[in-house]
Amino acid sequence: MKKETALRVGFVGCGGIANGKHLPAIKGVGGVEFAAFCDIVPERAEKANKEYAAGKAKVFTDYRELVRENLDIVYVCTPNNSHCEITVAALLAGKHVMCEKPMAMNYAEAKRMLDAKNKSGKLLTIGYQNRYRPDSLYLKKECEAGGLGDIYFAKAHALRRRAVPTWGVFTDEEKQGGGPLIDIGTHALDLALFMMNNYEPAYAVGTTYHKLNKQTETGNAWGDWDPDKFTAEDSAFGFVVMKNGATVQVEASWALNIADPLEAAVTLCGTKAGADMREGVGTLRINGVAHNTQYVVKPAFDAGGVAFYDGKSAKDSDIEAATFLDAVRGKGKLYVQPEQAAAVTQILEGIYASAKSGKPFVF
């Protein structure tokens, strides 16, 4: 049998998300050649080259040079304000692109990315890896099977108590486009819309708060943040009405005085049943009525009782990597469509705009 040709991959951005997620996941899946690394801090690109390409890849500090290389795929793992320009350049240079979440700073940028994708004929996907968790995969099948009926109300949960990322540019509103709403709220909102299969918003009402970001003794999980550099909101909330009348509530915080934080989770309410992940990531409860009696079912995602099986499933980032690489090879479809990610960005922008104006934002 003829051996499959390795896909040539280039990385723009060799920081935390590249090293913590994409690089090890791709290496684990295999079938790729790490051919180029780019970072504005050359030491980071050199480090990635040494660890993942034995020093044989090309190293750049300018993404424009990287996209001119003979590559099949470009991974965009940079701050949010550069997602659009790098993705568009890579697509128009004939490369498939995996861009980290959120897709873009605003809907206009997301549209530019979609236009470049359509013009190039190449694949574009966004890094919403929470879709690949066992609880998410199960819930999506249940929704598609009609088990919940018409889902008309949802909550997108992205609440941290005191877990502000103090590295990189996360707290820089100018470079990131916002704080927890665009950072972790985007994951929860993506899950909610995906489960509902509803991507057409009518209007949004939003509020953002800067109540805790100037505190000093913070109790933060990653150490005290710098109040002078924390320009993004510390919490944000949105009320979104979709064109079909469904309602989605979005709650996001890096710092909030709340005893029960909950992140990357959804609550869904339909005409036949409801579902929630309120007991934490990796858990799922489905509630309904049968034989005139209320019930709650908790699917088990850790198949135990077999001596040689540890009950562990593949990591969501590994499944994400394998799914995307298979799609590039023509062996499957993208699980995260860029049009879906663009709708998430559109709604996030609407919540921020409403918070700024003090009025509902009409899409």
Image (tube, grey):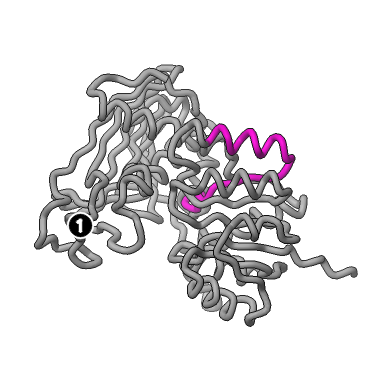
The relative height of residue 103 versus residue 11 in the rendered view (above or below) is above
- Image-quadrant location for residue 6: bottom right
The relative height of residue 296 versus residue 55 in the rendered view (above or below) is above
Q: Is residue 221 left or right of residue 144?
A: left
Q: Is residue 310 left or right of residue 246?
A: right
Viewer-closest of 109 and 327: 109
The relative height of residue 217 versus residue 277 in the rendered view (above or below) is below
Magenta span includes 322: no
**Residue drawn at (56%, 32%) of the image:** 111
Residue 288's x, y, as percent? Answer: 37, 34
**Residue drawn at (59%, 75%) of the image:** 49
Magenta part of the chain: 110-131
Magenta span includes 118: yes
**Residue drawn at (25%, 66%) of the image:** 222
Q: Which residue is mark 1?
A: 162
- Image-quadrant location for residue 204: top left
Viewer-closest of 328 and 234: 234
Q: Is residue 258 visible?
A: no
**Prevailing SS of the magenta stretch:** helix
How many labels were placed on the picture? 1
Name the quarter where the N terminus is drawn. bottom right
* Type of amino acid at the residue the image marks with label 1: Arg
The relative height of residue 292 versus residue 203 in the rendered view (above or below) is below
Residue 137's x, y, as percent? Answer: 52, 48
Q: Is residue 106 left or right of residue 157?
A: right
**Structural crowding at the residue carrying mark 1, measured as other residues with C-alpha within 10 Å and reported as few (<14), some (14–19) or many (≥20):** many
Q: Is residue 8 visible?
A: yes
Residue 11's x, y, as percent? Answer: 59, 62
Residue 334's x, y, as percent? Answer: 64, 45
Q: Is residue 58 left or right of residue 149?
A: right
